[in-house]
Amino acid sequence: MFYDYTKIYVKGGDGGNGCSAFRREKFVPLGGPAGGDGGKGGDIILQADSGLRTLVDFRYQTHYKAKRGQHGEGSSMHGRSAEDQVLRVPVGTIVKDADTGRMIADLIEPGQEVVVAKGGRGGRGNKHFKSAKNTAPTLAENGDLGEDTWLILELKLLADVGLVGFPNVGKSTLVSMVSAAKPKIADYHFTTLSPNLGLVKVSEGESFVMADIPGLIEGAAEGAGLGHRFLRHTERTKVLIHVVDVSGSEDRDPYEDFLVINKELGKYSPKLTERPMIIAANKMDITGADEKLETFISQTEGYEVYPISAVTGEGVQKIVYRAYELLKTVPDDIFLEEIDEDEIKITKVEEEKQFTVKKDGNTFYIMGEEIDRLYHKTQFSSDEGMMRFIKILDGMGVVEELRAKGAKDGDTVVVKDIEFDFLD
């Protein structure tokens, strides 16, 4: 089953907690702190696999969570870091942030990887907090939370040659004729509901991949039918073969069909109009096609037109050779985005505020991502942990902000599920 679009949730593993412990060997008096660090949580990694052709595996499982790191232990024993979780996707997969639409990665090379959710760092054990003033700290940290996000995976098949054209013009038949692909073929529109790939052998050691792009219709660029889903795959083809029913067997004008499809390609992506294109004037085996071919060639001046019959094989080998010749003229980096130097701007980076304070009567709520991170790392079971938490809040400017908001002695300050009285 072919799937070329999906939405998944990924979360890196949480870091293991640091340990608060002390050396207790019989002959080591005042052994000091010996709490081990927590291990790092596993990353979520997407890896391009040339053996995959669809995103169907992600249809049945949409949530992926890496394992957390092990907690630290006494005797300075560090927790083991968790293994990364690698998710295999087809070559040609684009990864986007589901909330913003920002592209994270374009996996166009086999084996290419991208980390989409980092695991959290392990918390530090109490031996890290030993100082001249505090030689026996009980303070240790919890591990960081792993990153989490929703992703859009969008597959654009990588093929050398793409067949475009209206439904039922013979694209699938042509692919089956020149390759070992066995697409479903029938005499009605939209028989093909997903792209078919076929390996076309030109000669010994020379071949290319041909893709049968499902039938496009007028308005495809605006999403008519399954327009966007089908047009997506044309972006990764180096050469286009425009297949038309030159016989007009369905009472349609082949030249009008040709103009409509080209218009949809241009509207979807102007770059597609710059790709090398040749025309396969198909169904030459039907009576009357010869006369219509002459008219069609005169109307499409400037394009190479190859009369063929995908059913009998007439002219097919000739167009295959020509497509292969054109492939050699197309650079391998055609899919790389060009950077417009005029769009590169130098902007001043301003430090974002790490927290916000909201007032509700005599209660003040402290919120923010950095506050959440600090809260999660703190082991509140330790008095030293609580004091360090408050000291860091003060260093961040929270106390100063509370004063500015009008906080007075006895007012309640809330951080997550912890409440304490404000004492200036």
Image (cartoon, rainbow, N blue to C red):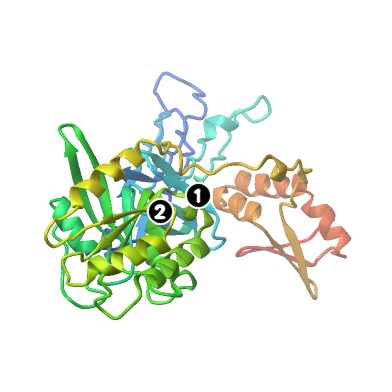
Q: Residue at x 33, y 53 (%)?
A: 157
Q: Position of residue 123 (x, y in %)?
A: 50, 40
Label total for image: 2
Q: Is residue 417 left or right of residue 332?
A: right
The relative height of residue 127 versus residue 228 in the rendered view (above or below) is above
Q: Is any atom of residue 33 visible in this view?
A: yes
* Residue 196 position in % (x across, y down): 24, 58
Q: CA distance from mark 2 to mark 1?
A: 38 Å
Of marks 2 and 1, which one's residue comes earlier in the chain? Answer: 1
The three-letter amino acid code for the residue at tag 2 is Tyr
Residue 138's spot in the image, x, y percent? 55, 39
Name the quadrant of the C terminus.
bottom right
Q: Which residue is mark 1?
A: 104
* Residue designated by label 2: 303
The quadrant where residue 235 appears: bottom left
Quarter-of-image position of residue 7: bottom left
Residue 61: x and y in percent read 30, 63
- Does any portion of residue 51 appear in the rendered image? no
Left/right placement of residue 422 relative to residue 269 reads right
Of 43 and 287, the residue lying toward us = 287
- Looking at the rendered structure, the kind of residue marked 1 is Ile
What mark, if any, has residue 281 been given in the picture?
A: none
Single out the residue that lies furthest toward the top.
Answer: 27
Q: Residue at x 60, y 65 (%)?
A: 417
Residue drawn 64% across the image and 27% down it: 131
Q: Nearer the viewer, residue 204 or 20?
A: 204
Q: Is residue 412 left or right of residue 303?
A: right
Q: Quadrant of the N terminus?
A: bottom left
Lateral position of residue 58 relative to residue 277, left or right: left
Check disc 2 and report its element: helix, strand or loop.
Answer: loop
Image quadrant in which you'd find residue 9:
bottom left
